[in-house]
Amino acid sequence: MSIRPVKRHSKAMPTREGAGVDLFRAFGFEEPSAFDPFLLLDDFRNDRPEEYAAGFPWHPHRGIETITYVLAGSVEHGDSLGNQGIIQPGDLQWMTAGRGIIHQEMPQGDAQGRMHGFQLWANLPAALKMTAPRYQEVSSADIPEVIEDDGTKARIICGEMWGAKGPVEGIAADPVYVDVSVPPGKRRSLPVETDSHAFAYVFAGSGTFLNASGPRRPVTEAVGEVAETAEPMVDNRSLILFDRGDTVTVQAGDQGIRFLLVSGRPLREPVAWHGPVVMNTRQELVQAFEELQRGTFLK
């Protein structure tokens, strides 16, 4: 067993997207090779409707997959193909934009005004960038949850872990996407494919990710500076990028810890990216936006 050490530790940064939605971005638009095949992770947890109600009106996508995981509230969606529906708490939508789609996502808070969830973007390999769009809509009841003897829980959205397989299938990067909860004071190891890139995003509680010899002194990256952290405790909105290995080991703090653990096989292809379109070359990118202007984007 080879424990993956922490390669990088950072905090999600506030940003604004859509028609004026305040959210936190864990990563995106910089160093796509570091998280390859993943491009962006947004944390849109918010308890103030005035900061998210404007939503994400009609916009295009090409060359990527968007993965929306809702914890509280709901997201109403519709697209240029006539698809529509509502993503409820605990549900997941895995949308393969492929050769092109135009859609909208409109958040709606619950009775307490909460709109909680995440959106992850995954890149598509060159051979599949112009594939037909498709959806994999998964209800909460269809996401398997494994509970270990020590109380550790894992909701397995995609991939396999501890003998359970997630309902999302047919994804080129062979990703694993798991919602993990470790009880207070417990230490837990989780398997990760050696050849995959892997990261964790903490959204409740706190804890420490370990290397082979115990707690690592991870590097915390801030704008314009790099500083070592003597106490490698991570908490809400912490992003941890792991180095190579086949296991991630976490020590939960006094309140336990809950995080997304995501891994995938890197594509190692060139990335040409502007806004909601991700292609392999600048020429392909320019063509996509010219098609949007001409009204020929949808195939």
Image (cartoon, rainbow, N blue to C red):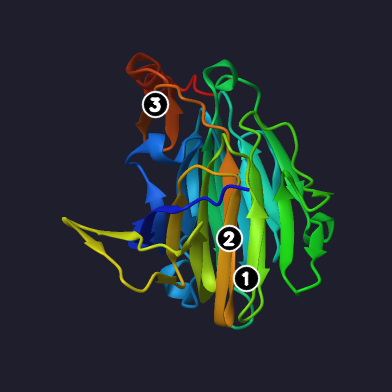
Marks 3, 2: nearer the viewer: 2
Q: Position of residue 17 (x, y in %)?
A: 38, 54
Q: Within the image, what quadrant is residue 79 found in?
A: top right
Q: Is residue 57 left or right of residue 250?
A: left
Say if 129 sits above or below 183 in the image.
Answer: above
Q: Mark 1 vs mark 3: which is more N-terminal?
A: 1
**Nearest to the observer: residue 290 or residue 119:** 119
* Amino acid type, residue under disc 2 in the picture: Thr
Picture layout, residue 11 above or below residue 68: below
Which of the two residues, 48 or 194, is positioned nearer the viewer here?
Answer: 194
Residue at figure coordinates x 46%, y 66% from the top left: 52
Which residue does the image show at 50% across and 64% down from the upper left?
209
Q: Secondary structure at mark 3?
A: loop
User: Is 213 positioned to the left or the right of 158 in the image?
Assistant: left
Q: For mark 3, what is the residue? A: 271
Quadrant for residue 221, please give it: bottom left
Q: Residue 240's spot in the image, x, y percent?
A: 45, 57
Secondary structure category for the residue under label 2: strand
For mark 2, does the 10 Å Cα neighbourhood hold few (<14), some (14 to 19), or many (20 or more) residues?
some
How far apart in space, not on screen, are marks 1 and 3 (Cα)? 38 Å
Are dots 2 and 1 in contact, CB under 8 Å? yes
* Mark number displayed over residue 249: 2
Residue type at mark 3 is Val
In space, the residues marked 2 and 1 are separated at their CA atoms by: 7 Å
Q: Is residue 266 or residue 109 the one in the foreground?
A: 266
State the separation of the CA atoms marked 3 and 2. 32 Å
Instruction: Please give the residue where the numbered disc 1 appears in the rendered image.
Output: 187
Above or below, comparing residue 173 to residue 183 in the picture:
above
- Residue found 67% across the figure and 48% down from its top: 93
Q: Choose the circle earlier in sequence order: 3 or 2.
A: 2
Q: Residue type at mark 1: give it.
A: Arg
User: Which of the two discs, 2 and 1, labels the residue nearer the N terminus?
Assistant: 1
